[in-house]
Image (cartoon, grey):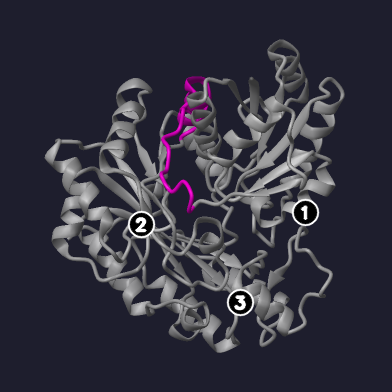
Amino acid sequence: MKVLLIASNIAESPYAVYPLGLSIIANSLIQDHHIVKQYDYLQNNKNLNSLTDTIKEFKPELIGISIRNIDNVNILNEQNYITAVEDIVKTTRTIYDGKILLGGSGFSLLPESILKITGADYGIVGEGEYAVRQFVKNLEQGTLPNQNIIYADSTKNSSILSGSYNKDILNFYLKHGNMAPLQTKRGCLNNCIYCTYPFLEGKTIRNRPTDDVIKDIRTLTDKFGAKMIFFTDSVFNDSEGNYLNLLKEMKRQKINVPWTCFIQPAELKKSDVQLMKDTGLIATEIGADAATDITLKKMGKKFTFDDILSTYKIFNDFQISSSLYYMMGGPGETKETVLEGIDNIKRIENGVSFIFMGIRILPNSPLELIARREKMISADNSLLNSFYYISPNIEKKWLEQTLKEGFKNCKNCLFPPDSHESLLKVIHKLGYSGLMLDKFISRKRK
C-alpha cells in the first residue's frame, strides 16, 4: 500500500524539531513492504499548494498525519498548532477521498476533540508503530475498526524501532541549526504534576538495545552528516543508571560525537560526567521546573534547589553548558516564593535560564485534577484550547511585571522564554548550529 505520512508540527521555538516519531512509523510500515513517503509541512514552508502537488504526484492509498504538540505552552505568546492540522486535512479532502489517520503525542492527549475538529477519519492513541501496521493490514482487507480511535498497547510490542530518517527532511533541520534526534529509551519513573510522559510512554523504563542506538548514531553522523545528536529521552540520566551502559559502550567503540540531552537534577559522580564528556557531551537541558523548595515539592519533584545547583555546578566545572527551565506560578507559589525564586535563578551565572509564566494544564496530568478540584476549569472544558494554572495566591499581572523587572538586567535569564528567538535565527543563518547557549553567557573560567 502507498502511504503518505505528514509531519504537521510547525513549532520553531526553542528550535525546530525533526519528526522522529513520524520516521519511526515510516520504518514500521516499510518493514511490512509498504511504499512510504514522508512529507514535512514546516520544511515545505507550510505551503498547502506544495502538499497538494505531493498528493497528486504520489497518489497515496492512506494518509497519516503526525501531531507533536497542541500549542506552544507560552501564555505570553500563545500559538495554536491544531489549526495547521485542520488546514492540512481540509486541503487534503479536496483532492483525496481515502482515509486520513491521525497520531502522535499531541493527538494522544486529546483524541476525541482533535478528531472532531479536524474531520479526520481515524486516530491512534499511544505508541503507534505496531498499531499502524495492523490498521493498514485491516485497511487492505477491507475490515476497518468499529471505533474511530484506536488505543495502542505498547506492552504487546515493547521493542522500540529506529527511525527511517529522510535525508531531505533531516538536511532541512540540520541546516537550520538543529540537532539530529535519537531515542534510547521510553518511559518515566517520575510523578511530576504537569507532565504527561508517564501517560504517553508508561511508568516503566524500556531501553533500546545498545547496539541499535550506536548503529543509529553512526547512521546519523556517517551517512547523513549530523554534527550533533540530541538524545530525546524524557530523562537521559535515569535513576536506574541505564544511560551509563550506553556511554561505556560508546567509549569502548571510540565514539565521540557532540551530543546533548535532558537531565534531571540528581547526585552525579565526577566519573560519570567525565564519561559523558569523553563521549561528546557539550550541553545539557536541566529540568529544574521550579525555583524554590516549596514549589518544587508542590510540583511533585524529589529534589531541592540545592540539588539543581549542584547538578548545574558539576557540569559547569567540566565546561559543559547548561540551560535550565522554570515555570513560575504553579501550585504553592506565593509572592514570597516568586521573589525567592528570582534570586535563586540568578545564582546560576554560567547557565541559560528560560522562565515560563504559568503552567499549561494538559489532559491526563495530575495538574488537571488539581485545577478541577480548585474549580479553575469547568467540567466540560476539554483543554483543547490552552488554559494555564496560576496560583490563586498571586495575580497574573503582578507575576508578569515582577518577572520582567526581576530579570530585565540578566542576560542569561530569558523572560519571556522566546525573547531569544530573533538572535538565534540570525546565528543559525550565519552557519552556526546547535543550542548556542554560550551566546547568552560569559563563562567564568577557573
Q: Is residue 310 above or below residue 60?
A: below
202 lies left or right of 306: right
Quarter of the figure with the C terminus: bottom left
Tell me the distance, in whole angstroms, between the alpha carbons under discs 3 and 2.
Answer: 23 Å
- Residue most toward the top? 57
Of the numbered discs 3 and 1, the one sitting upstream in the chain is: 1
Q: Residues within 10 Å of mark 1 (few under 14, many from 20)?
A: some
Q: Is residue 385 left or right of residue 347?
A: right
The earlier-in-sequence mark between 3 and 2 is 2
> Which residue is found at the position 43% from the left and 48% from the top?
158
Q: What amino acid does circle 2 point to?
A: Ser
Is disc 1 placed on a helix, strand or loop? helix
Q: Nearer the viewer, mark 3 or mark 1?
A: 1
What SS does tag 2 mark? strand
Numbered tag placed on residue 322 in the rendering: 2
**Residues rendered magenta in the picture:** 155-177
Amino acid carrying label 3: it is Gly
Q: Is residue 347 above or below residue 237?
A: below
The amino acid pointed to by label 1 is Glu
Residue 19 circle label: none
